[in-house]
């Protein structure tokens, strides 16, 4: 079992926490003070998990550890009512931040991932999607996690709606993982990636133009080479189901209705125990009304409905997500790990992110490619690769360095003010300056204070 040094866990939570971690093969060594932490780490090297419920005191332990033992792997657990601590944890050098309630497997996976840092092989896009974590430090995501936990206890179909890149597949895989079917497969299928015949062959294992009712018992037929057979006992996740031809939709609806299928080559009836999930944008209901999606298929994949908020509506999650992407990018490129400066992280949290997670990951990939060595990613490193209105980065020819910096500063302050709804105190704290200095900059840079709520 893997040991972890848990600092500051409330006494009332220790018994349950120990059971959760033990179930994931993680043993706990409890600690309360920096002195005891150092003493234990001198005896044996192990990861440290900091409970940030004590706020500044716990963060100071993280900073001291980063100074005295830079190689120590650190994680943190935060209360959902204090999402601001996520940012502070990332700035203190925490590798990953977990929201309460703490999940044992989540901690174990993060430890394994970080220990393999810099030595793991590059993964495919599909593998990377399954490896990603669902971060839920924001109020917008707390309702989502409640629905996910509820869905994990059922075998009904789940429709996950949201913009492209909002984490629909990550949410679907989280439901699958929480359902407890450890050996069952999660099989993602992007219906848009196939033409009509190829999609049918991929799903059913052979190309059949007609339903196989004539095969014997009015049941659909599937082959062992198909994705539907691979998902038996597990989950089939269908993206862009509106792109599937009507013939394929009809066959899928029949399978989900009968819950039985004929196994090709044997003519034996088998139980079709597959949980359907679908990922779509908000226009799927319109596609049903227009006849683009069969109503009977829609009903079976949408018993439970979950709406994923876009990244711009869950800004409290951005520091942890950005940190996750940054560490993965550095590891995959075999470059020294990097951290964020406070101003750089504040800028990331303020950007509009119309492309959601993939846009954030692409930006950080560009930034890492342009920053040499280890160290902190500064505000200027990000500004070189992004325009604050969400367009591609542009560098204006002409003008002095002072003028260029003033443009950057004006856009940055305006973006942070927008993030905090025009509240000067909150914006000044995010910017790391005094309120009086912010008022002065607003006047000198001619930045509008914007809306206040």
Image (tube, rainbow, N blue to C red):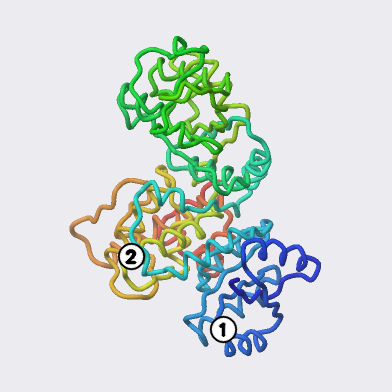
The residue to which callout 2 is attached is 381
Q: Can you say whether 21 is above or below 357 in the image?
A: below
Label 1: which secondary element = helix
> Is residue 287 in view from this perspective?
no
Residue drawn 44% across the image and 9% down it: 214
- Residue most extreme to the front: 266
Classed neighbour count for the residue bearing mark 2: other residues with Cα under 10 Å, few (<14), some (14–19), many (≥20): some
**Mark 2 vs mark 1: which is more N-terminal?**
1
Residue 102: x %, y % from top left:
66, 59
Q: Nearer the viewer, mark 2 or mark 1?
A: 1
Q: Can you say whether 298 is above or below 337 in the image?
A: above
> Is residue 395 in view from this perspective?
yes
Foreground residue among 262 and 20: 262
Residue 327: x %, y % from top left:
42, 65
Foreground residue among 288 and 388: 288
Q: Can you say whether 185 is above or below 279 in the image?
A: below
Residue 306: x %, y % from top left:
59, 35
Label 2: which secondary element = helix
- Residue most extreme to the right: 12
The residue to which callout 1 is attached is 64
Residue drawn 28% across the image and 52% down it: 393
**With 355 as the anchor, is 421 left or right in this view?**
right
Residue 435: x %, y % from top left:
56, 66
Q: Can you say whether 197 is above or below 18 in the image?
A: above
**With 11 as the anchor, is 102 left or right in this view?**
left
- Residue most extreme to the left: 397
Q: In which quadrant of the rendered view does residue 210 lie?
A: top left
Q: In which quadrant of the rendered view does residue 386 lie?
A: bottom left
Classed neighbour count for the residue bearing mark 1: other residues with Cα under 10 Å, few (<14), some (14–19), many (≥20): some
Q: CA distance from mark 2 to mark 1?
A: 27 Å
């Amino acid at each position: 079992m893997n040991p972890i040094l848990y600092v500051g866990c409330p006494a009332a939570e220790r018994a349950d926490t120990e059971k959760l971690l033990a179930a994931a093969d993680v043993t706990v060594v409890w600690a309360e003070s920096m002195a005891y932490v150092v003493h234990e780490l001198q005896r044996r090297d192990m990861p440290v998990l900091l409970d940030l419920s004590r706020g500044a005191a716990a963060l100071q332990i993280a900073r001291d550890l980063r100074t005295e033992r830079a190689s120590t792997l650190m994680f943190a657990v935060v209360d959902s009512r204090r999402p601001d601590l996520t940012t502070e944890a990332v700035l203190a050098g925490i590798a990953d931040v977990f929201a309460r309630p703490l999940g044992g497997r989540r901690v174990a996976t993060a430890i394994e991932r970080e220990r393999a840092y810099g030595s793991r092989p590059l993964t495919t896009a599909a593998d990377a999607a399954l490896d990603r974590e669902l971060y839920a430090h924001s109020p917008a995501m707390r309702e989502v996690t409640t629905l996910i936990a509820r869905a994990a206890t059922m075998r009904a179909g789940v429709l996950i709606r949201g913009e492209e890149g909002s984490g629909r597949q990550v949410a679907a895989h989280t439901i699958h993982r929480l359902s407890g079917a450890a050996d069952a497969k999660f099989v993602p299928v992007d219906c848009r990636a196939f033409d009509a015949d190829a999609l049918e062959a991929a799903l059913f294992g052979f190309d059949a133009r007609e339903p196989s009712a004539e095969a014997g018992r009015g049941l659909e037929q599937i082959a062992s080479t198909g994705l539907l057979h691979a998902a038996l006992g597990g989950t089939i996740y269908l993206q862009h189901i509106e792109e599937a031809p009507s013939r394929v939709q009809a066959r899928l609806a029949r399978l989900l209705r009968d819950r039985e299928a004929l196994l090709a080559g044997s003519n034996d009836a088998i139980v079709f125990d597959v949980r359907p999930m679908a990922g779509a944008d908000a226009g799927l209901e319109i596609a049903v009304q227009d006849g683009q999606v069969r109503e009977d298929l829609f009903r079976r994949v949408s018993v439970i409905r979950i709406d994923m908020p876009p990244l711009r509506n869950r800004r409290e999650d951005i520091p942890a997500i950005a940190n996750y992407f940054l560490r993965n990018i550095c590891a995959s490129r075999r470059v020294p790990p990097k951290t964020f400066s406070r101003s750089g992280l504040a800028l990331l949290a303020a950007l509009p992110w119309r492309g959601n997670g993939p846009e954030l990951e692409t930006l950080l990939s560009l930034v890492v490619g342009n920053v040499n060595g280890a160290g902190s990613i500064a505000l200027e490193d990000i500004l070189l690769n992004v325009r604050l209105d969400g367009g591609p980065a542009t560098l204006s020819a002409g003008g002095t360095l002072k003028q260029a910096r003033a443009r950057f500063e004006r856009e940055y302050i305006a973006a942070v003010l927008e993030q905090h709804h025009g509240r000067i105190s909150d914006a000044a704290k995010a910017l790391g300056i005094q309120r009086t200095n912010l008022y002065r900059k607003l006047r000198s840079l001619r930045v509008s204070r914007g809306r206040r709520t």
